[in-house]
Image (spheres, rainbow, N blue to C red):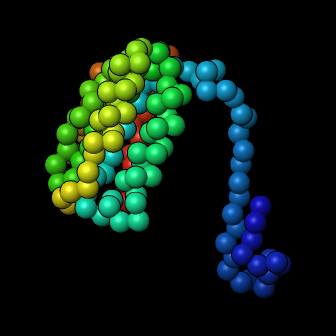
Amino acid sequence: MYSGHHQISIGGQEEVIQIGIQGRKIDFEELQPMNLAFVIDHSGSMADADKLNWVKDAFNIFIEQVRSVDYVSLVIFDNQAEVVYPAAKMDSNEKRLRFKQTVHSIRPAGSTNILDGLQLGCLEVLKNLNREYTNRVLFLSDG
């Protein structure tokens, strides 16, 4: 637990306390199968401070870890949303390479339409919804 001051006041001073919790660490291979839709903001503001490049770097790491039992899809949005990589089981190197190429082809443009992006992401997860899987929409945006 961390405080903004060295000492917490009992005299009514406002205080912000940060509490960190560390869960049990398990290997990626031991995780439940995943059904993930990544929804990436590629509006013009994502060009600032290399934000979109950070997203691409993270996907370079992710795609090396994804397993053949995992489903992955990719939705991008600016002023409109588009499924650029429909939900697919990552059961071949060709699919992983195509996913990685799709991510690296994203360029900043347009304004921000979050709602359409999230709706398409949810629809992609619903295609392979399974109680035995971790079903998630992962939203990457600066807004």
Q: How many marks?
A: 0
The one nearer the camera, 44 or 23, is 44
Residue at 35 percent across and 19 percent down: it is 94
The one nearer the camera, 32 or 9, is 32
Q: Is residue 137 visible?
A: yes
The relative height of residue 6 versus residue 96 in the rendered view (above or below) is: below
The relative height of residue 5 versus residue 58 in the rendered view (above or below) is: below
Q: Quadrant of the C terminus?
A: bottom left
Instruction: State which quadrant residue 14 falls in.
Output: bottom right
Residue 79: % across, % down: 17, 54
Residue at 49 percent across and 34 percent down: it is 62
Residue at 69 percent across and 28 percent down: it is 26
Residue at 26 percent across and 51 percent down: it is 107
Residue 131: % across, % down: 46, 18
Q: Quadrant of the N terminus?
A: bottom right
The relative height of residue 126 versus residue 39 in the rendered view (above or below) is: above
Q: Is residue 122 visible?
A: no
Residue 108: % across, % down: 26, 55
**Left or right: where 62 falls relative to 102:** right
